[in-house]
Image (cartoon, rainbow, N blue to C red):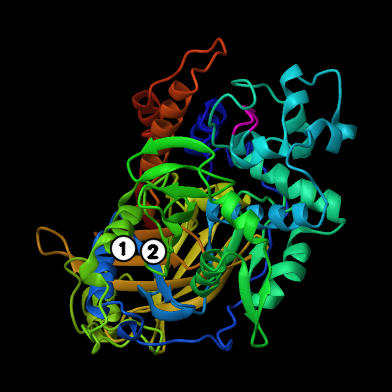
Amino acid sequence: MGLGLDMKFMDFVLKYASGKTDDMPFYQGNDVPYFLRTDESRDIKRTKPYKKGVSGAGIKKLFDALSRDESVGLAGFGMMSGGEVIAEAYNPPYNSRYRHVSFSMCKSVVSMAVGIAEHEGLLKLDEKLVDIFKASNNVFMKKEMKSVTIENLLTMQTGVCFDEVSSSFALDWCREYMSSDFCMEPGAGFSYNSLNTYMLAAIIVKRSGKPLMDYLKEKLFDYMEIKDITWDKCPMGIEKGGYGMKLSVIDMLKLGQLYLDYGAWTVNGEKKQLIPRKWIEESARVHVKLGRDVIDGYGYQIWRLKDGSILFNGVFGQNVYINRDRNLVIATTASAYDIFPDGKIVNRLCDFAGDDKNFTNTPLGAAVDFGNGLMAGADKLAKKIYEKASKNQNKNKYRQYFNDYLGVEYKFDEYAGSIIPVMIQGVYSIYSSGITGLSLGFKGNSLYLKVCEENTTYKIMLGYKEEEPYSYQILKVKGKDFPIAAASAIAFDEDGRPLIKIRIVYLEEVGAMTFKLIFSGGRLKLKTLEIPKLKKVAGKLAQEEYIRKKEIKLSRKRTLEPPEYVKYKAGKVLAPIVIGKPDV
């Protein structure tokens, strides 16, 4: 999700809150509809941390700290040293079989493509967009657009106002971008905008004559055995560039290692220069000084941190941290409420790399075994699904407490939430008017949740045993495959009354739904909570947008709304609590 929070975003929030899903403003274009399972058969070198002079105990301490912090929502974690994986871990239900949405982390991948294209003579950094997209030149074009260069795109210094939210209302993103208003003169200052990266992708497509993914497969991915990725496209069929890419933790580590090794990769036992070393050095150099917390500045679609490290960063905790001094690459996937890199995850990565105690040639922590791909202790941490959940759950427990309610379908007369988190609905334009019916029951020893939304019925299998808390399946929603994991647990309220908690995790997205089912008097009270919380996301985006506009001294004649006002309006979209009646 980008940072272009304005009244269009609020229009989306308020329309959704009013149930007006037939006329939603967001249109994201042709995303990849199918689920592509990660190829786990690839040969990648692994070793014990201490063999690379890294403390296994220190790694586990870092992983545990990230895992215990609920605001981080850590999904996957990996560490590489000297080209070998020394740690890989996942918090269940996440695991190595699934990719993860990268958000803005893939901006750095677009930078790699630009560097290769420049080396091949397909483009020059001082080229102007008006000379590349001549067909988009028109009488509505602002005079500032005539001076925007490829380098302005790379350093986020175009000053263009057409951003990610605005693109959701447009079919031809290139044309709209070229006709955009400006919030400042090109080159005058830093203004983070995902559509700058999209234009870089469009340039690669135009000059190479092939899709960006095909270009990268030929130049990078095939050599690196990066196979299990997808990249969503704009309505005109061009990769979104600034977001929409999914890849695995291992693939993230590989891309980081490529940068650590200055663009060289071992192919058939020999080093091959996939990206020019000069580009690696130039793209990771600070071109825009920022000086925010751990951030030193911004390069060519790449962050530079104050500890000298390089960072590929996406919102909600998607990171590739590259520290050459430590010969170290760390990758994380998560659902944190961090917008820019100065958040909890990156701060902890910097602290880890800055502590000499974590780097030793002695076998400190050697007993912590990461060679099998799953960090010891990860399962135990993540199996605690819900607070106060009863232990040793089984079919008889559900029958004991809820027998009269199992198999009964309950109908809702008001908006009851959805099984799809609102943010995922917005990203893929698969809006739902909400749950209209719900039932819970057993078929043999399998517990299921049946949900009716609009004219579709979804049957979701639920894990309910302590030793096997999650059930995995593919949920098809309006033609798109979503791999999910679902769990249930019996819990008790403050008065000791039993209730059922259900959690549905979208394994490749930043998104999860929690339903609390309270049965009483023949009725069902349904409480819905989703991650990420729309109110909190909107508040964070509003705060960052407010800071950004203050920094660039926005000159347009429009009142700058403080983030408190936006948070207030977004607060109208609350987790619904509704009563369902038996369908008789």
Write the start and end of the magenta stretch as one range.
157-162
Q: Quadrant of residue 222?
A: bottom right
Residue 89 position in % (x across, y down):
37, 77
The residue labelled by disc 1 is: 353
Q: Which residue is rendered at x = 15% and y = 64% of the image?
A: 497
Compare residues 222 and 122 and report the one nearer the observer: 122
Compare residues 382 and 579 and report the one nearer the observer. 382
Q: Which mark is residue 310?
A: none
Residue at the limit of the structure toward the top, as seen here: 557
Mark 1 in CB contact with mark 2 (< 8 angstroms): yes
Q: Check disc 2 and give the amino acid type.
A: Asp
Q: Residue furthest right?
A: 135
Q: Front-most of 189 and 316?
A: 189
The image quadrant where one finds the C terminus is bottom left
Would you say residue 316 is visible in this rendering? yes
Q: Residue at x 61, y 39 (%)?
A: 164
Q: Tell me the residue that label 2 is attached to.
A: 325
The percent coordinates of residue 298 (x first, y second) are 50, 42
Residue 301 screen position, x and y as percent? 58, 47
Q: Amino acid at mark 1?
A: Ala
- Give the CA separation, mark 1 to mark 2: 9 Å
Label 2 SS: loop
For the stretch drawn in magenta, the main secondary structure is loop
Q: Secondary structure at mark 1?
A: helix
Q: Position of residue 100 (x, y in %)?
A: 52, 65
Within-10-Å neighbours for mark 2: few <14, some 14–19, many 20+: few
